Amino acid sequence: MFSSFSSFANPFQLPRFLRSGDTAAITIDPVEVHDVEVHPVKRARTLKQLLKLNHANNAIIYHNLQFHNHMAHILGSAYLFHAQSDHLNAIYDEESKELEPWQDSPGEVSTYDWRDYLGNPRYQRAYVDFFKDELVLNGYHWHKVLEEYLFKSKEPLINNLISGLGHPLIHLGYAYEFSSRELAMEALAMAACSYNHLHKYLDDPSYTKPSSKPSKSPLEILCRVQKDNRFEGVFSNPSAENLALLFQNHEDLMLEYWNSWHIENPTEDFKASQMAAAALLVASRKPDGAPYDFFLVHVLTTSHAVRILLPLLPAKYHVPLVRQWWLLTLSVYIAQLRPEIMLSSVTDYDLQARDWNWVNKQAIESKHALDAHYVKGLRAMRTAAQTWGDDDQFYLKAAVRFGHEFDGWGGFGVGSDEQSTTQQ
């Protein structure tokens, strides 16, 4: 049975391993940390209780070990949109309907064999228990457990956070943002269970090569991918199942574009990548009323997670983490049949006097306020605007268009199982 673990109660301070003077750092201010464990306001206490309830009762991977538990993501996002306790409880009730209870793993995991079960989601309970035991041994200092298991090995978990469609990366961002050791241990378990072949592209430097057509613009490269006829006929339908096939059958072509992004000024180039993430979701939607693409929203929410984590990670991991995101972005874009990105559909969008207050209201009061990915998408664009400024209102226009037009998700392909992403 899960015991009740509380978040780190001391005021948030960056531990030693997160304060690095290495070069090639991406320099942005950290977001505010919301330590709901010690916050006296009612809605903060509600969030704390619901996160603990989810941690104790609900598996982090469910539905034939294919879907990821997004409870913490939507609760945290709604909280930051100033949702009150009643709405947070409503989210929990709705999201819980499809979640599943924990199941025993085939065996235990120990310090001697914890890497033997990487990539096996049947061991999710065992991994959570293992990392929680490590938490106890480290005096409940969850940062020390993350330091040990994210960074300290020849093939560290930090280099495979984009597995499982980036959900370990997203979950880790919420762990830091809410100073939650429960979420931190879940994020480690999620990373362990989702571990796959993608780590080699970061672990093995031979995959990184000079490009014959380098570009500083992720959007420009995506437009080149969209027009590249070598991808014609590679896939007939958009699907998460395309991701594994893409690397199996077209690795050289993938890596050609992965290496095309020339990161020269890391901070400015990351800024460009955040714009690309928003554009890819919103500006790729066809004007015929087609639904927004479920997989492309993960490009945006993983970019948001990178933004949360960068100020907290050692500088030597900054560019590699952004390049991880870029690998995920390219693979998802190609797997979803390379939709055209019509930037003018955002830049020319008529706001009709709608502002960020309108966006905030959509996130917690609209008919889609219980949709985790809708709320997270809106929040990611709002945070990007806060991070970089939004003088041209690009992020506001993207968020308003998305908030207004959204009416469900698409992009699953014919006969595909929605969100089947655990091993991708």
Image (cartoon, rainbow, N blue to C red):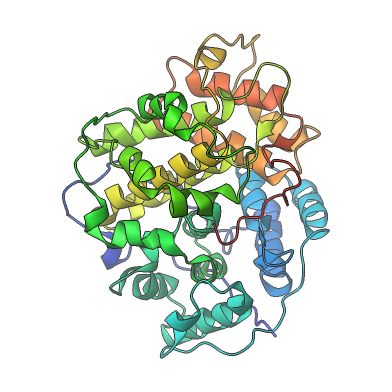
**Could you tell me residue 227's position as x and y percent?**
44, 23
Residue 107 falls in image quadrant: bottom right
Residue 248 in view:
yes
Task: Indicate the quadrant containing the N terminus: top left, top right, bottom left or bottom right.
Answer: bottom right
Question: Is 259 situated above or below 53?
Answer: above
- Tell me what residue is drawn at x 74 percent, y 72 percent: 57
Pinpoint residue 250: horizontal percent, then vertical percent.
42, 46
Counting from the top left corner in percent of width and height, residue 27 is at 27, 41
- Depth check: give the residue in front, 221 or 69: 221
Going 64% across and 10% down the picture, which residue do you hit?
A: 353
Q: Nearer the viewer, residue 74 or 124?
A: 124
The quadrant of the rendering that contains the C terminus is bottom right
- The percent coordinates of residue 367 (x first, y second) are 81, 34
Specify whether 291 is left or right of 326: right
**Nearer the observer, 85 or 419:** 419
Query: Across the whole image, how many numbered discs are drawn on residues?
Result: 0
Q: Is residue 309 left or right of residue 35?
A: left
Q: Quadrant of residue 193?
A: bottom right
Relative to 187, residue 1 above or below: below
Residue displayed at 71% across by 29% down = 291
Q: Quadrant of residue 421?
A: bottom right
Residue beneath the point at 21% across and 46% down: 209
Whether residue 29 can be seen here: no
